[in-house]
Amino acid sequence: MRTNIVLDDKLVSEAFKHAKVKTKKDLVHIALQEFVENHRRKNMLDLIGKVELDPDYDHKKLRERVRDVSG
């Protein structure tokens, strides 16, 4: 989607210091991705106390399996 926006030059300069991208388009894309991911994470936090996990669930064992498969 093509759009024209006015960006804060100081904020853009600061963002470029933290991102490994060269274009404003890529910078905005990363910012939008992180914005969405942060809100998804926040929505998951809303589930605290509402979801019951299997008492035998071992997240550490799962991480070890993923690490073994990825090399």
Image: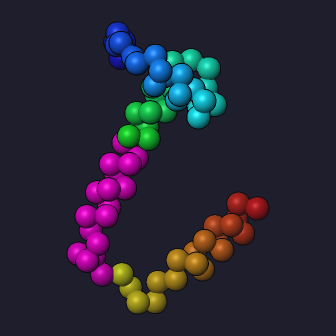
Residue 59 place in picture, x, y as percent = 52, 77
Q: Which residues are magenta?
A: 36-52
- Res. 26 visible in picture: no
Total labels: the figure holds: 0
Judge whether residue 59 can be spotted in this image: yes
Viewed as shown, does residue 43 lie left or right of 55?
A: left
Where residue 35 appears, x then y in whole percent?
Answer: 38, 40
> In front: 6, or 4?
6
Looking at the image, which residue is at 72% across and 69% down?
68
Q: Residue furthest bottom?
A: 55
- Asked if residue 8 is positioned above or below residue 61 in the image, the reply reads above
Relative to 56, is 23 above or below?
A: above
| Quadrant position of the N terminus in the picture | top left
Q: Quadrant of the C terminus?
A: bottom right
The residue at the point 52 percent across, 83 percent down is 58
Q: In this view, which residue lies farthest toward the top?
A: 4
Q: How is the image coloured?
A: rainbow
Q: At which x and y percent is residue 13?
A: 54, 22
Is residue 19 in the magenta section? Answer: no
- 19 and 49: which one is in front? 19
Q: Residue at x 32, y 61 (%)?
A: 44
Task: Give how far across and how far down residue 64 sits, in percent.
Answer: 66, 74
In the image, residue 41 sits, relative to residue 27, either above or below, namely: below
